[in-house]
C-alpha cells in the first residue's frame, strides 16, 4: 500500500500531471475512472470537485485505492512511466477518498428512488458497487446481507495490513449518503427466498454472493486434518485480531511449518499472516513461474522480505501423514506429530510448460515437511439461493449462467448476477468493472417494464 499523503504532498504530486491530449492512464483503468479530471481538480486544491470526478465512475474509491493493481493498469500507461516515475495514482486516489470521508464531502445527491426498487443480495465489493451505481441512477436500493455485519470478503477475507476495516465501514456509510439501505442477518435462501423479495415489490434482484465455498485438491491424503482453506484461515485470524475469537482458533503456533498452495493475492495474504502469527517456516507452492503469479508485485516483494519461501513449477500430488514421512526419510527433527490422521508433509511434482503451453511432468519430485497446509486455489458460490428458487441455471462448477443482453441477467427474468458468483474468484477492481456492466443491464430491463 502506498504511503499516506498529506494535502500538500497530494497537490504537489497532482501538479506533475502533463494533461495529455490522449490520457493513456484512463485507458489502463478497468472501470474507466476519469483519472485526468480528478487529478487536475486536485492539483488546484478543489477537493470537492476532485472527489466528485472520482466517485462518478467508482462507488468504492478508498477500497480501490488500496486494492487495485495500479502498478499493472493505470500507472504503467502514464507517459511519465517512461522515466520510471509515473504519477502515483494509487496514493492520490487513497488520499482523496479518505480526505473526503473525513471531511464529510458528499457531492452526490441522495436517491429519491423514482427509478424503481432493487434488491441486492450480498455486501461484498460487487454487491456494494452495484448498490452504489444503482443509487446514482435514482433507484431505491436495499442490500440484504446474511451476516450481522456488512462488508463480506472486504471485512473477513482481506488482512488489515492491506485494507483497514475502518475504511470498509466508511465506504459503506458513504453509500448510505446516496440512499442505499441495508438489512443484515437476512440469509437469502433460508430466511427469505427470491419469490419473497419479488413479493415485496422489487423490480429486479441482483445476486452478489461471491464465491464463498473453497475448492479442494482431490489427491491422496485429502482427508487428513490440518488442511485448511485460505478464506477460512483468514477469517479466523481477522476475528481473533478483533477480539471475537480465541487466538487458539487460528490453528497456528510458533512451531508450525506451513505450506500455502496458490499464487494469487489470497495465497500471499495467507502466507504473510502465517508469518505474522509466528509460524516457524512458510512456503508458497505454485504451479506456474514467478512472472505468472496473479498477486500484486508489491505483495510478492513484501513476502520475500518477510522470509517466505517459494517453490515454483510444482504441483501437489499427495498429502503425507507421519508414517509416510518417516518411511520416506523426510521427517524433520524434532517433529511433534505422531498422529497419522494429521498432515505431516506434502509431495510435489516438478512441472514445466511444453511448446503448446500445456503443463508436463519433468520427473523430479520434492517432499516438504509441514504441520499445516492452506489452500488458496479458488472458490465457488454457495448453492442455498439457487436451491430455493426455480429458473436459475448454474454450470457444472456451480457458477451462475448469465446473458449478455441485458447484461448479467440469469435464466430467470429479473434476477441478475455478476462478479465472482459468475466468473469465479477475481480482483476487487474486476468485480467492480463487472458490476458497472450489470447495472446497465438492470437499468435497461427495468426501463422495459415501465
Image (cartoon, rainbow, N blue to C red):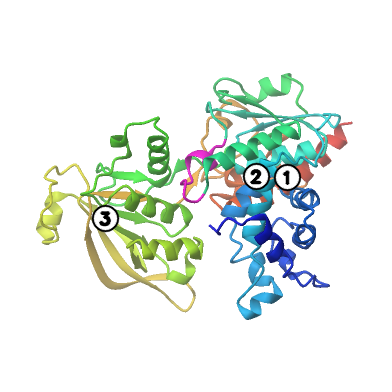
Q: Which residue is mark 2?
A: 418
Q: Please tell me whether the stretch drawn in magenta is mainly helix, strand or loop.
A: loop
Above or below 152: residue 279 = below
Occupied quadrant, residue 229? top left
Total numbered labels placed on residues in the image? 3
Q: CA distance from mark 3 to mark 2?
A: 35 Å
Q: 10 Å neighbourhood of mark 1: few (<14), some, or many (≥20)?
A: many
Report whether 351 appears left or right of 76: left
Q: CA distance from mark 2 to mark 1?
A: 7 Å
Above or below 141: residue 399 = below
Q: Tell which of 387 and 230 is nearer to you.
A: 230
| Position of residue 125 measured from the top left corner of the image (x, y, whole percent) | 61, 43
User: Quick check: can you spot residue 413?
Assistant: no
Q: Which residue is mark 1?
A: 438
Occupied quadrant, residue 111? top right
Lower sequence index among marks 2 and 1? 2
Q: Which residues are magenta?
A: 151-162
Residues marked 2 and 1 touching at CB (< 8 Å): yes
Report whether 190 appears left or right of 59: left
Q: Secondary structure at mark 3?
A: strand
Q: Which mark is residue 260?
A: none
Report whether 374 appears left or right of 345: right
Q: 10 Å neighbourhood of mark 2: few (<14), some, or many (≥20)?
A: many
Q: Name the mark nearer the viewer: 3 or 1.
A: 1
| Position of residue 110 measured from the top left corner of the image (x, y, whole percent) | 80, 33
Q: Which residue is mark 3?
A: 318
Amino acid at each position: 500500500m502506498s504511503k499516506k499523503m498529506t494535502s500538500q504532498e497530494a497537490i504537489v504530486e497532482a501538479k506533475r500531471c502533463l494533461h495529455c491530449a490522449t490520457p493513456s492512464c484512463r485507458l489502463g483503468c478497468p472501470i474507466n475512472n476519469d483519472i485526468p479530471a480528478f487529478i487536475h481538480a486536485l492539483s488546484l486544491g478543489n477537493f470537492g470537485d476532485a472527489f466528485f470526478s472520482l466517485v462518478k465512475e467508482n462507488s468504492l474509491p478508498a477500497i480501490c485505492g488500496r486494492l487495485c493493481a495500479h502498478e499493472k493498469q493505470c500507472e504503467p500507461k502514464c507517459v511519465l512511466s517512461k522515466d520510471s516515475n509515473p504519477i502515483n495514482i494509487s496514493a492520490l486516489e487513497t488520499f482523496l477518498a479518505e480526505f473526503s470521508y473525513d471531511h464529510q464531502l458528499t457531492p452526490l445527491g441522495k436517491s429519491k428512488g423514482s427509478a424503481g426498487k432493487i434488491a441486492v443480495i450480498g455486501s461484498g465489493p460487487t454487491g456494494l458497487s452495484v448498490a452504489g451505481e444503482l443509487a446514482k441512477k435514482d433507484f431505491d436500493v436495499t442490500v440484504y446481507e446474511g451476516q450481522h455485519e456488512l462488508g463480506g470478503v472486504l471485512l473477513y477475507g482481506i488482512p488489515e495490513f492491506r485494507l483497514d476495516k475502518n475504511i470498509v465501514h466508511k465506504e459503506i456509510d458513504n453509500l448510505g449518503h446516496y440512499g442505499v439501505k441495508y438489512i443484515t442477518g437476512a440469509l437469502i435462501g433460508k430466511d427469505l427466498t427470491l419469490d419473497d423479495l419479488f413479493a415485496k415489490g422489487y423490480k429486479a434482484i441482483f445476486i452478489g454472493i461471491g464465491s464463498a465455498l473453497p475448492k479442494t485438491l482431490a489427491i491422496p491424503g485429502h482427508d487428513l486434518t490440518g488442511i485448511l482453506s485460505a478464506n477460512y484461515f483468514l477469517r479466523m485470524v481477522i476475528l481473533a485480531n478483533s477480539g471475537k475469537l480465541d487466538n487458539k482458533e487460528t490453528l497456528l503456533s510458533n512451531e508450525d511449518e506451513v505450506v500455502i498452495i496458490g499464487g494469487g493475492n489470497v495465497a500471499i495474504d495467507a502466507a504473510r499472516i502465517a508469518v505474522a502469527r509466528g509460524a516457524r517456516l512458510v512456503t508458497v507452492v505454485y504451479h506456474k513461474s514467478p512472472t505468472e503469479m496473479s498477486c500484486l508485485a508489491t505483495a510478492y516483494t513484501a513476502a520475500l522480505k518477510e522470509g517466505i519461501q517459494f517453490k515454483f513449477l510444482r504441483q501437489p500430488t499427495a498429502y503425507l501423514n507421519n508414517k509416510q514421512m518417516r518411511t520416506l526419510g523426510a521427517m524433520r527433527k524434532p517433529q511433534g506429530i505422531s498422529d497419522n490422521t494429521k498432515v505431516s508433509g506434502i509431495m510435489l511434482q516438478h512441472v514445466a510448460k511444453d511448446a503448446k503451453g500445456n503443463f508436463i511432468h519433468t520427473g523430479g519430485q520434492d517432499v516438504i515437511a509441514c504441520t499445516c497446509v492452506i489452500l488458496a486455489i479458488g472458490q465457488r458460490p454457495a448453492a442455498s439461493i439457487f436451491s430455493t428458487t426455480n429458473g436459475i441455471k448454474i454450470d457444472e462448477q456451480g457458477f451462475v449462467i448469465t446473458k449478455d443482453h441485458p447484461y448479467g441477467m440469469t435464466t430467470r427474468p429479473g434476477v441478475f448476477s455478476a462478479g465472482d458468483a459468475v466468473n469465479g474468484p477475481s480482483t476487487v477492481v474486476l468485480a467492480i468493472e463487472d458490476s458497472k456492466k450489470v447495472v446497465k443491464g438492470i437499468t435497461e430491463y427495468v426501463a422495459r417494464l415501465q
